[in-house]
Amino acid sequence: MAETEHRVGVLVFDDMKMLDLSGPAEVFSEANRYGANYRLSVVSVDGNPVRTSIGLQIPVDSDTESAPAFDTLLVAGGDLLPGRPVEANLGAAAHRLAGSAGRVASICTGAFILAGAGLLDGRRATTHWQHTALLARSYPSTRVEPDALYVKDGSIYTSAGVTAGIDLALALLEEDHGPGLARSVARSLVVFMQRPGGQSQFSASLQGPAPRTPVLRLVQDLVQADPAADHTLETLAEWARVSPRHLTRMFRTELKTSPMKYVELIRFDMAKALLDSGHGATEAASLSGFPSYESLRRAFARHLGVSPTRYRDRFTTTRPAPRRPVSPTDPDGHDGP
């Protein structure tokens, strides 16, 4: 029996991000090679070709008035969207198409189009981390989650920066066909499907501005270059040629944290990356510089509220893993490497 056709429409406009279209489109196109039946249509407000962010012009299949009802509507983003009001005709087109779509998803700053069309009122949403604060200020009825790759609220989905559109497309694919097909597509495209929606958009080492003080930049570079090294407060102070007390004071004044908390965050980033790539929890703890699995477990509990093993389990699917039965001998379900 033939797979029922699933119509995917992409709303585009001048200066849209090329990858916001091509990334998800490749996911759905590749899925067709594995038995899915997605039919992709590209629409613009007036039916004219649009110019992308890289200067290429792409044709469209129809204008939004004559477009059919879509099972999935994707709304692309663009660099200019956060800096100006959404054009009335673009917002109206999004609202009209969304009204007949089975589900609606924005890529990156496409969230501003959905918000401008009133589709995010009272909903949770995200967008590129550089613009989450502006989205929250501009649309106070939207509950913005600034550190998520994508957010689902009912039938409305929003995603973070451009490559998060691929994560979202894989999640939509998994909803339709299960994790097996989604994994096959991810492997074929040589991308990860292992980033669940709640995963951080960026690492702790990239959050906030770079320190102004050369000594702090030196210490940051030292820790980031080798997180597993023996980074005690005393050794870091020795490298910086200041006293431990002075180094602590500089960290608190400029970075609002302590040297040891900063070291933990960098090691935490590395441990997450190791778990993402398939390493076991004990091995990730050792390679990232944590003295034991238990210390890594405590760090994960502080930062994510889950154990390393449960975090790793989520990376076999785009959906949260079911809760494991609690073992009296191993309450976190730790299974070693």
Image (cartoon, grey):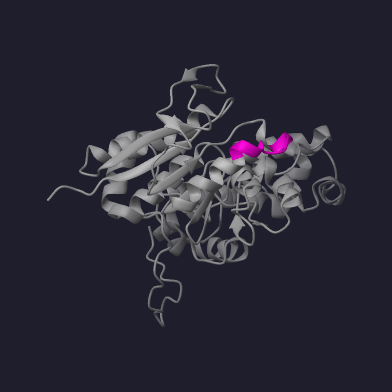
Q: Position of residue 315 (x, y in %)?
A: 41, 54
Quarter the C terminus occupies? bottom left
Vertical placement of residue 190 versus 232, above or below = above
Total numbered labels:
0
Q: Tell me: 255 left or right of 58.
A: right
Which stretch did the figure color magenta?
A: 82-90
Check the image and name the residue furthest to the front.
Answer: 66
Q: Position of residue 123 (x, y in %)?
A: 60, 60
Vertical placement of residue 173 versus 219, above or below = below
Q: Position of residue 228 (x, y in %)?
A: 57, 46
In the image, is residue 89 part of the stretch drawn in magenta? yes
Check the image and name the residue furthest to the left.
Answer: 1
Q: Tell me: 98 left or right of 326.
A: right
Q: Residue at x 47, y 42 (%)?
A: 74
Q: Residue at x 27, y 48 (%)?
A: 181
Q: Position of residue 82 (x, y in %)?
A: 69, 37
Q: Nearer the viewer, residue 185 or 159?
A: 159
Picture quadrant of residue 53? top right
Q: Residue at x 44, y 64 (%)?
A: 310
Q: Inspect this view and state whether residue 102 appears.
A: yes
Q: Tell me: 85 left or right of 3.
A: right
Q: Nearer the viewer, residue 120 or 247?
A: 120
Q: Inspect this view and state whether residue 190 appears.
A: no
Q: Residue at x 28, y 53 (%)?
A: 177
Q: Nearer the viewer, residue 69 or 265?
A: 69
